[in-house]
């Protein structure tokens, strides 16, 4: 399947296709815009790779350029506007961008870049589009395996890697989700997650295109603007990644919140406690999936999936011990591995060592920790780099975080390793509070949790106003781990053998 095929299927569709603020384009007009953008790209991109970077919020040009790249046989590189200076320049160079297109508001981030930059809001770009107005639909031949986009990982564990996103990798999820949820031209897909990230492209943009639904873009996510947008656009489907559900739920509830057209909310990494609450408050179905930019493994939840579970282990997917490669029995944490091959993973761009790390012995290694129960239901346990090794035992951080979040005063929790003075690690947690909490009551709460093992007990706890996050709302634990006990603010500590937490005094051992 190709994005080109999906676009051509909309070429004569005069129903609304794209909405942004107060502007509307039919699908026919959208496809024509893609053809005109393709003509401009053909004129500008003369190198062998035809890679063009885009540094922009969720504006119509992003959608036109992605379609334009499909028609021109070019590759769109999604650049992250939260990256700065040398880091952003590194991304541009790594992706072999021949040209960078940017909104005027972000142009200053590209000062000094040794690659040509064009302002999407400027007169030169407007003149180029005017010169190619009315360009014929002349799509370059494309196959499902052809590269269409480079999307960078979030960079939670190091420098972001550029993931190769082929036509099929973008088009197939759109068709699958449109079919799965019965979406059609009578629906509206609301996209407020950043389009330089895979979630917005594969669980939003391509879904609208495949279904022929209206694609409603918001420049940037806004918790207070979410429900007004849903009502204004008539949105029946929305995608998310990370914390947006929590942010929307934090807005003051109103009696008519459920009076809206929203039917399906689909995404991943939502807080478990928020899923049912969001569904009840806004009268919709929330489907939280497990996925990554790389796409090597996917889970499907069924009605009998227990709370907190990713779903049953798919065929060809196993949980293996990271050191021995042995299959882990129920309850034992190991790495999720696709033993049947790469799945949808098409490799990283110009990063053979990272490719080799993912694909070993013909198997795709996710780097994600998990365990399964006796019925085969799988539970996420953190990232491979999230191992906390306490007294010779490897512990995943996600189960500890889920237990901490049971406390009504804890809004967010991040668990990570700090070095043990003797050997291995000790468990540390950073907490964001919604209500006051003192060390004594926190310790009493942990002591009452029957499924919290003694080695899982956080040895150190720090209270923070917010957790460090990427632009896609993922927690950057390496920043917390790097600060360790040298962090600002109070740290709670406990003796080795009980839950009697006390405030650690700065300057003491």
Image (tube, rainbow, N blue to C red):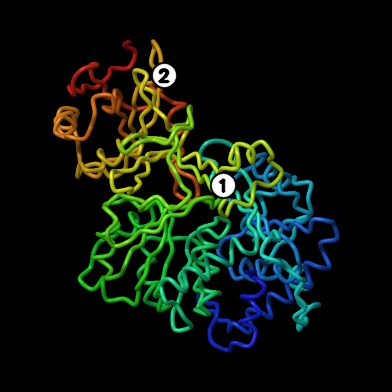
**In the drawing, does residue 336 fall left or right of residue 332?**
right
Q: Is residue 125 above or below residue 244?
A: below
**In the drawing, does residue 72 fall left or right of residue 489?**
right
- Residue 153's disc is 1
Residue at image coords 40%, 63%: 266
Query: Residue 6 in the image: x percent, y percent?
Result: 61, 75
Query: Residue 215 in the image: x percent, y percent?
Result: 51, 74
Q: Nearer the viewer, residue 101 or 420?
A: 420
Q: Nearer the viewer, residue 396 or 192?
A: 396
Alpha-carbon span between mark 2 and mark 1: 27 Å
Q: Is residue 317 above or below residue 204?
A: above
Comes first in the chain, label 2 or label 1: 1
Q: Is residue 174 above or below residue 339?
A: below
- Residue 302's disc is none
Residue tagged 2: 419
Q: Count neighbours of disc 1 (C-alpha within 10 A) and say few if under 14, some if 14 to 19, many if 20 or more.
A: many
Q: Is residue 479 visible?
A: no
Q: Count neighbours of disc 2 (C-alpha within 10 A) and say few if under 14, some if 14 to 19, many if 20 or more.
A: some
Q: Quadrant of the N terminus?
A: bottom right
Residue at image coords 64%, 48%: 347
**In the drawing, does residue 294 fall left or right of residue 330?**
right
Q: Nearer the viewer, residue 220 or 62?
A: 62
Q: How many marks?
A: 2
Query: Residue 275 in the image: x percent, y percent?
Result: 30, 58
* Helix, strand or loop under label 1: loop
Query: Residue 357 in the image: x percent, y percent?
Result: 60, 36
Q: Quadrant of the C terminus?
A: top left
* Helix, strand or loop under label 2: strand
Q: Is residue 503 visible?
A: yes
Residue at image coords 42%, 36%: 327
Residue at image coords 23%, 20%: 494
């Amino acid at each position: 399947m190709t994005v080109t095929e999906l676009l051509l299927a909309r070429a004569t569709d005069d129903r609304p296709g794209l909405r942004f603020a107060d502007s509307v384009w039919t699908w026919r007009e959208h496809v024509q815009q893609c053809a005109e953008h393709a003509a401009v790209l053909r004129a500008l991109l003369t190198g062998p790779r035809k890679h063009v970077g885009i540094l922009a919020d969720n504006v119509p040009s992003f959608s036109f350029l992605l379609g334009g790249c499909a028609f021109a046989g070019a590759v769109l590189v999604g650049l992250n506007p939260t990256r700065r200076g040398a880091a952003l320049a590194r991304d541009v160079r790594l992706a072999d961008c021949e040209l960078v297109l940017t909104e005027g508001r972000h142009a200053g981030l590209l000062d000094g870049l040794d690659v040509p930059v064009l302002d999407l809001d400027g007169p030169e770009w407007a003149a180029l589009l005017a010169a190619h107005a009315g360009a014929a639909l002349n799509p370059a031949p494309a196959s499902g395996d052809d590269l269409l986009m480079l999307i960078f990982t979030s960079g939670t564990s190091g420098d972001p890697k550029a993931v190769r996103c082929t036509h099929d990798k973008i088009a197939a999820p759109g068709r699958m989700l449109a079919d799965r949820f019965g979406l059609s031209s009578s629906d509206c897909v609301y996209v407020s997650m950043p389009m330089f990230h895979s979630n917005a492209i594969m669980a939003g943009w391509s879904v609208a295109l495949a279904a022929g639904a209206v694609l409603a873009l918001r420049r940037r996510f806004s918790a207070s603007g979410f429900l007004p947008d849903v009502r204004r656009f008539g949105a029946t489907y929305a995608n998310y990644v990370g914390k947006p559900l929590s942010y929307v739920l934090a807005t003051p509830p109103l009696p008519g919140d459920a009076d809206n057209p929203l039917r399906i909310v689909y995404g991943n990494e939502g807080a478990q406690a928020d899923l049912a609450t969001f569904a009840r408050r806004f009268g919709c179905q929330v489907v939280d999936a497990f996925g990554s930019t790389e796409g090597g493994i996917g889970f499907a939840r069924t009605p009998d999936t227990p709370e907190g579970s990713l779903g049953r282990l798919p065929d060809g997917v196993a949980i293996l011990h990271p050191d021995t490669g042995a299959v882990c029995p129920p309850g034992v944490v190991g790495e999720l591995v696709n033993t049947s091959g790469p799945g949808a993973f098409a490799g990283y761009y110009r990063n053979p060592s990272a490719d080799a790390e993912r694909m070993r012995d013909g198997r795709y290694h996710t780097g994600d920790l998990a365990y399964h129960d006796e019925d085969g239901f799988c539970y996420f346990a953190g990232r491979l780099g999230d191992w906390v090794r306490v007294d010779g035992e490897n512990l995943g951080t996600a189960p500890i975080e889920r237990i901490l979040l049971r406390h009504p005063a804890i809004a967010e929790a991040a668990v990570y390793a700090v070095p043990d003075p003797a050997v291995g690690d000790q468990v540390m947690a950073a907490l964001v509070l919604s209500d006051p909490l003192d060390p004594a009551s926190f310790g009493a709460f942990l002591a009452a949790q029957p499924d919290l093992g003694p080695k899982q007990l956080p040895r150190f706890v720090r209270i923070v106003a917010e957790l460090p996050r990427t632009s896609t709302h993922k927690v950057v634990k390496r920043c917390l781990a790097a600060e360790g006990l040298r962090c600002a603010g109070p740290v709670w500590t406990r003796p080795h053998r009980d839950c009697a937490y006390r405030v650690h005094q700065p300057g003491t051992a």
